[in-house]
Amino acid sequence: MEAIVAALASGAYTKPYGMYNIGNSKPVRLLDFIEAIEHRTGINAQKKWLPMQPGDVARTWADVSELQRDFHYQPQTDLDKGVKAFVDWYKAYYGVGV
């Protein structure tokens, strides 16, 4: 994110607006994501296993190709580091000891 903010602040980005996917560009299993949150919060999620629901997708991930093209963005944050940063931010922002 820091590289994108720096690029925007430099004035090199001249489009009046833009919308980008920001992510790691690699699929992450939902269970791995849940387990990372559990690990960082110390709370075990109450899971209710159900079959695929309408609108569910088997695999999805962020297509960051436009972000790479416009800002030379290269994903650098792995799942655990990203979840840790989010949980730390959440705790500080909301003043909670999750």
Image: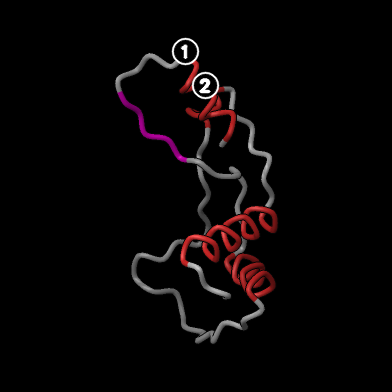
- Estimate how packed mark 1 is, as few (under 14), some (14 to 19) or many (20 or more) residues with alpha carbons within 10 Å: few
Which residue matches tag 1?
12
Q: In the displayed structure, does residue 30 sit left or right of residue 18? A: right
Q: Where is residue 51 drawn, in percent x and y? A: 46, 80
Q: Quadrant of residue 98?
A: bottom right
The foreground one among 45 and 64 is 45
Q: In the displayed structure, does residue 60 sit left or right of residue 74? A: left
Q: Is residue 19 magenta?
A: yes
**Quadrant assignment for the N terminus:** top right
Q: Farthest residue toward the front? A: 95
Point out the stretch of residues depicted in magenta.
17-21
Q: Farthest residue toward the left? A: 16
Q: Quadrant of residue 74?
A: top right
The foreground one among 53 and 96 is 96
Q: Where is residue 5 drawn, in percent x and y? A: 51, 29
The foreground one among 8 and 74 is 8
Count numbered badges in the picture.
2
Element at label 1: loop
Look at label 2 and name its amino acid: Ala
| On screen, residue 79 above or below 69 | below
Q: In the displayed structure, does residue 77 sit left or right of residue 20? A: right
N-term mark: 1 or 2: 2
- The structure residue drawn at horizontal position 46% and vertical position 40%, both measured from the top left corner, is 21
| On screen, residue 45 above or below 35 | below
Mark 1 and mark 2 residues within 8 Å of each other at the beta carbon: yes
Which residue matches tag 2?
7
Report the predominant secondary structure element of the magenta stretch. loop
- Estimate how packed mark 2 is, as few (under 14), some (14 to 19) or many (20 or more) residues with alpha carbons within 10 Å: some
Look at label 1 and name its amino acid: Ala
